[in-house]
Image (tube, grey):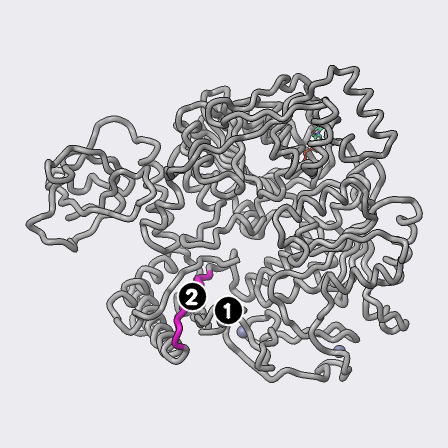
Amino acid sequence: MFADVIVDIQHEKLDKIFQYRIPESMEGKLEPGMEVLVPFGKGNRQIRGYVTGISGTCDYDLSKVKEIMEIPERAMEIEAKLVALAAWMKENYGGTMIQALKTVLPIKQKENAKVKKRLRLLLDEETGRRQLHYYQEKNQKARARLIAALLDDHVLEYELVTKKLNITTPVIRALEEQGVLAVETERIFRTPLKQNQQQTRRITYTPEQRNVISRFRQDYGAGVRSTYLIHGVTGSGKTEVYMEMIRTVVELGKQAIVLIPEIALTYQTVMRFYRRFGDRVAIMNSRLSAGERYDQMMRAKAGQVDVMIGPRSALFTPFPDLGLIVIDEEHEPTYKSEQTPRYHARETAIQRAKMENASVVLGSATPSMEAMYRARRGEYILFEMKNRSRMQRMAEVYTVDMREELKNGNRSILSTKLRELMEDRLEKGEQIMLFLNRRGYSGFISCRECGHVVKCPHCDVSLSVHRDGKMRCHYCGYEQPKITVCPECGSRYIGEFRAGTQQIEEIVHETFPQARVLRMDMDTTRQKDAHEKILSAFANEEADVLVGTQMIVKGHDFPNVTLVGVLAADMSLYTGDYRSGERTFQLLTQAAGRAGRGERPGEAVIQTYDPSHYAIETAAAQDYEAFYEEEIRYRELMGYPPAEQLLAVFVSGEDEVLLEKGCHYLKEYILRVIRGLSGREDARTGKTGVRTMQPAAAVIGPASPGIDKIKDVYRRVIYIKAEQYELLVAMKNRVEKYIEINSGFDSMRIQFDFNPM
Ligand code: ADP
Ligand code: ZN
Ligand code: ZN
């Protein structure tokens, strides 16, 4: 037997794995992730390495292969645990060991140390308050916001202020010139942020919060490690609960990782963690350079940090004694990696926790189908938090049937109800958000008269119009010519929904010439910092209306927004994939939650051509349970995850004819493997030869995935559906071998995506 061993894992060039012979005395004892001592180089210097895989064959000249020297006795190193996790990821998500290692290991890169800036308040409390008052009087909203924040915490990170508090550089400069604050520079690794005041305020937990906290404490104290799912409405106090759980494990000398989607990591949230845990908290975000990220990881490894907060990649923080992983907004699609290995942070967190004896806490106002399904089956412990901690009311939601508007002669994209409410808010000087529910590529055809949408007869997802004028299913490849007359009602008002944010902006201008409108979408945010500029202008109330795509729905708190309009709520229903109902429900619930964050109650208007669609009806009623019941029935009926498991095999290549041929052979091969597996299944049940048995898996496609050609590379996808995840993993391994030994696939690239999102 031979072992693949990586050495020197701290360096950028993580592309070499060496093979060593396993001495007989170690056979059966080695596993991926284990530390070994190996001879290295000409002088056979003894160095440490990590086993990444074990095989029966050797790719090198056998006479030159060296032997592993020994397995060190001491406990598993932090890196060894991460290498073992990488091995699990490679097996369960596909790709190479190198790709998996690069995902989980902190890798050192040479670069100049970045200088980090801080803002420090120079005024005493009383003068500061007077200055705040002065800015408020003069209606200088940004300055007021900044000084108010500095009065709360005398030192603030520059980045936090510009990116999360939506304050622009000129405002900071102005306050610097007025002697209100000083901009200081420090090197981040050496002197982490110190907060003057740690949280002293004690809050009285609600009964719902107490229940969750005490159950967690009890379990944890008794040595029980589990996965918990907190289903709690926005404002129910989930974050307070996370912090209390984190305190529990930190007091035991352990560490915690908190995953929060970057866009939801608001100024308020960051400050809450800083106040509670002081400089024992590190924040990771995508704006950190590779070097800064490495520094943060090393601080964590050295035991200088108890809590790491960040997006998906923070999951791989090399803590010496990990006790807890929290995943907030667990349903967010950003938790799925778009690069190989296409891992899901939720599943990977649960695996890491299992390997390191930690617990996992998932939280969401709209839990993913996967998480709720598992919770209902008893795999996770479920907590419900149905009340807002401070008894704020939820927004009032109205649904408007746009087919009725058309019948009544209103062809505008704004319904009468929404127009009336907008008029009211503009008069009162309150703010409005208009959200165009448009997501990525969609080109579905719908009837404006009756709401009918053309769907695939096999897959029950909407068909998409392609440039050649045909309508296709992205799963199975079914196609039909584009239609011009509604098959349901005969109307000619059928076609692609084309309105974009720019058009909406124009319509608002025409309808309300006095209104100041800002637009936020792909076009207006292309420039660096454009995001922050738009959001800060809106936060400063320099505009009455913010028009945008889903990037405006998440994360931002605007207390003066009391009306949210959702235009074309249906659009996300017909993106041609099985998750569109779930995404729609989540987006609409979030959008409605944007209205009425401050003192005043909010209202939301959902405009739709299909008001009786369950995703829209249940979102308007803010009824998660009802949504879940309907959705899980659909998933079970169609065999989509989480009821069954789905593996997407993406094949791409520059020669379309070859690609088609390759896909054909690949599908034939997959079908053969399935028949073999089903046959064996028959044998096991003693019914050999009986072919009435259900096949173990089904194959769908090949089809064009959404966009069938990017930069002259053609793409196809084959889906495999099965009840057992393990079967899909086995299938992935077989397919990998098959394409490796068939040179016909040399010009093609194959990637795997398990339960694609
Ligand atoms: P979620 O994470 O569920 O949206 P948060 O934990 O952010 O909820 O709580 C919402 C707001 O209510 C926060 O300002 C928080 O400080 C406050 N809060 C939470 N729990 C309590 C409580 N028991 N008493 C008073 N205020 C609370
Ligand atoms: Zn129709
Ligand atoms: Zn189909």
Q: Position of residue 561 (x, y in %)?
A: 80, 44
- Residue in front for this viewpoint, 554 or 515: 515
Residue identifier under label 1: 705
The residue that appears at 80% across and 35% down in the rendered structure is 141
Extent of the magenta region? 646-655
Do tag 2 and tag 1 residues touch (Cβ < 8 Å)? yes
Check disc 2 and report its element: helix, strand or loop. strand
Which quadrant holds residue 687? Answer: bottom left
Q: Position of residue 610 (x, y in %)?
A: 75, 66
- Residue 457 at least partly seen: yes
Q: Amino acid at mark 1?
A: Pro
Which quadrant holds residue 408? Answer: bottom right
Horizontal side of 442 relative to 114 (left or right) equals: right
| Outermost front residue | 177
Q: Position of residue 229 (x, y in %)?
A: 57, 40
Ligand 2 in which quarter? bottom right
Horizontal side of 134 relative to 689 (left or right) equals: right
| Residue 648 magenta-highlighted | yes
| Residue 401 magenta-highlighted | no
Q: Amino acid at mark 2?
A: Phe
The residue that appears at 31% across and 62% down in the rendered structure is 736
Residue identifier under label 2: 650
> Quick one: label 2 or label 1, which is nearer the N terminus?
2
